[in-house]
Image (cartoon, rainbow, N blue to C red):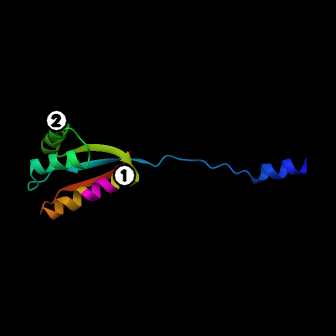
Amino acid sequence: MEQTQSQQSIHTRFLRREPPRCHVIFHNDDVTTMDFVVMLLERIFRKTRADAEELMMKVHTEGQAIVGTYPLDIAHSKASLAIKLARAEGFPLQITVEEV
């Protein structure tokens, strides 16, 4: 009986929580080209050409658009990479990450 009680006290329950989900949002500016935005959406965010063009137009006409929803670390990684590529090309593209 003592062995069973000690074994039960050793077992600890770990609660696994999903990481928070976050929206990646592109913001419109007057410098970043539409073609560059489409390229980022295709390469980094894995959008089809048609989806990328539709999102780019939404950013252009509405001022911003959610381009994807990902776990926190992936959202930040994708946003950081896109900003790094934009800066390397001289574009001031603004991208934010917001928790859902």
Highlighted magenta segment, given as a residue range: 77-81
Identify the residue at the far right of this view: 1
Q: Assess whether residue 80 is covered by the magenta stretch.
A: yes
Identify the residue at the far top of this view: 50
Residue 61 percent coordinates (x, y): 12, 41
Residue at the disc numbered 2: 50
Q: Is residue 80 above or below residue 52?
A: below
Mark number, residue 84:
none
Q: Is residue 76 above or below residue 59?
A: below
Q: Nearer the viewer, residue 59 or 9?
A: 9
Question: What's under tag 1, amino acid-wise?
Answer: Ile
> Dividing the picture into quarters, in which one does residue 55 lie?
top left
**Mark 1 Cα shell of 10 Å, populated few (<14), some (14-19), many (≥20):** some
Label 2 or label 1, whichever comes before in sequence order: 2
Q: Assess whether residue 69 is covered by the magenta stretch.
A: no
Residue 53 percent coordinates (x, y): 14, 39
* Residue in the picture at 13% in, 60% down: 91
Q: Nearer the viewer, residue 48 or 90?
A: 48
**Mark 2 Cα shell of 10 Å, populated few (<14), some (14-19), many (≥20):** few
Q: Magenta stretch: dominant SS?
A: helix
Element on which disc 1 rests: helix
In space, the residues marked 2 and 1 are separated at their CA atoms by 23 Å
* Residue in the picture at 13% in, 44% down: 60
Residue 15 percent coordinates (x, y): 60, 47
Mark number, residue 74:
1
Residue 48 percent coordinates (x, y): 21, 38
> Dividing the picture into quarters, in which one does residue 81 lie?
bottom left
